[in-house]
Image: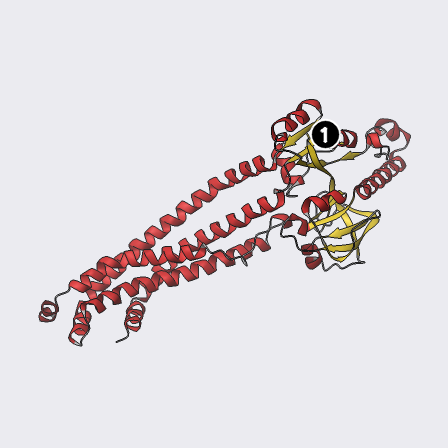
Amino acid sequence: MNIFKISYKSLTYNLLSSFLNVLLIAFGIGILTLLLLGSQQISQKLENNSKDIDLVVGAKGSPLQLILSSVYYVDFPTGNSSLNDANELSKNPMVKLAVPLALGDNFNGFRIVGTDKRFVELYNLSIDKGKYWNANFEVNIGANIAKEANLKVGDIFYGSHGLTINENIHKNYTYRVVGILKPQMNVCDNLVLTNIASVWKMHEDEEEHHVKKNLQEHGNHYEEDHKENEKPVPFENGEKEITTLLIKYRSPMAIVSFPRIVNQTTNMQAASPALESARLFSLIGVGLDTLEWFALLIMAIAAISIFISLYNSLKERKYDLAILRTLGASKIKLFKIVIFEGLILSVLGAIIGIALGHVTLLVIGNYQDANQAKITGYVFSNQEFLLLGLAILIGFMSSIIPAIQAYRSDISKIISKA
C-alpha cells in the first residue's frame, strides 16, 4: 500500500482546494525568498564596495549623497572641491592613502572615473587583458562593461555628460580601451577608469566650445556678461578641481579627529561610508520588515487553510479510511497518509515559491537602471533551506490534528453508519 500515492490521489480529488493552499504557501515563501536574497545582495554590495574606505571627503551637501555618488556611483556628486585643499588633506599624518576622484560622465550608464593608480591599490585591482591606463583618454573597463558593451582592448567610445545615457555626448575626444580588469565582485566591475587629466581636458574643451558658440550667436555682450561663468578650468595647480577623496586611515585613532578637522578647517565635508550605509540600510529595512511580516501573515493563512481543508476532507473520507483499515492498513498508516497530504502541499508550495522569488529577482534586475546596484536571481543562499524547513513545519503542524482524528477513528461505528 503506497502511502504517498494515496495521499496524492486524495489531494487531486480536491484539486481546487489543494491549488489554493499551494498558491498561498508559494506566495508567502516567494516574498520571503525575494526579501532574503535581495537584502543579502544589497548588504553584500554595500560591504564589498566600501570595506577599505574609511572616509569620503567632498563638497558640502548631503553626506549620504556624497557616499552614494563616490562609493556606490548611483547618484549625482555634491559638487567639486579644490585640488589644492585635497592635496593638503592627503599629506595629513593620519592619512595612509588618499585616492582622488573626478566624476561627471558616463558610458552607456557606466560611470567614467578619473583617478590615479592609488585607486588600483585601494581596491586591489588586477588586469585580465591589456595593461593599465597611462596616457590621456586611455581607460581600463570593468568585467561587466566588457561583457555588456562587447568591448575589447583597442576599441574606442565616446562619453556622455552626467548620468544621462547616450545624450550630451562628448565628441571632442574618444576614450580607448587599453585594459580590461579581472572580475572584482564589487562596483569596479561597472566602472570606466582613466586619469584625472582626461576628465579635465574633456570638460575644458567642452566649455571653450560652448563659449565660442554663444559668442557667435550673441556677440560681444555675451562675453562681457558671462565671461566669469563660462571660464574654462585651467591647468594651473591652484585652480584644478576634483570631485572627492577616498580616505584610508593610518590609525583607528583618526576616526574621531580627522572628520572634525575636515569639517571645521576646510570648505569640504567628511562622510563615513560605514555610518551612511548603515543609515541607508536602516531606512530600507523598514520596508523590508513590513513585507516580511506580510509574508508571514500569508504563511499563517496558508497554515489555517491547509488545516481546514484536511479537516473537512477527513469528514468526507471517513468511510474510505475505514475501508483501508479493513484491508489491513494500521492506525499509524492512516496517520501518515494525512500527514503526507499536508507535507505534499507545503513542499510543493515552497518549491514553487522559491522559484518564484528567483524569477522575480531576475525581472527586477533586468529593469534596473543603475548597473552598480543590480541584483540577480542567479544567486542562491543556504538560508533558502530554512524557508523549505519552515514550509514543511507548517504542513506538519496543519495536518497533525486531522491525522490524530484519522488515527482515532472507530472502524465499526463508521461502517455501521454507512
Q: Is residue 214 above or below residue 141?
A: above
Q: Secondary structure at mark 1?
A: loop
Farthest residue, direction top: 264
Amino acid type, callout 1: Asn
Front position in the image: 326 or 107: 326
Can the viewer see residue 27 in this picture?
Answer: no
Left or right: 12, with 47 as reference point: left
Color encoding of the figure: secondary structure
Classify 10 Å Cα crowding around label 1: few (below 14), some (14-19), many (20 and above): some
Estimate the x, y position of residue 357 in percent, counting from the top left: 48, 56
Left or right: 240, with 107 as reference point: right
Q: Is residue 185 above or below residue 324?
A: above
Question: Quick one: quadrant of the C terminus?
Answer: bottom left
Residue drawn at point x = 39 percent, y = 60 percent: 349
Say how many tags the image has: 1
Left or right: 351, with 176 as reference point: left
Q: Is residue 272 above or below residue 323?
A: above
Residue drawn at point x = 58 percent, y = 37 percent: 274
Instruction: Answer with the quarter of the image where residue 92 lies.
Output: top right
Residue drawn at point x = 32 percent, y = 66 percent: 15
Estimate the x, y position of residue 371 in percent, counting from the top left: 64, 50
Question: Quick one: quadrant of the N terminus?
Answer: bottom left
Can the viewer see residue 144 in this picture?
Answer: yes
Estimate the x, y position of residue 297 in percent, counting from the top left: 36, 48
Instruction: Answer with the quarter of the image where residue 99 lies.
Output: top right
Q: Which residue is mark 1?
A: 92
Estimate the x, y position of residue 173 in percent, counting from the top left: 84, 48
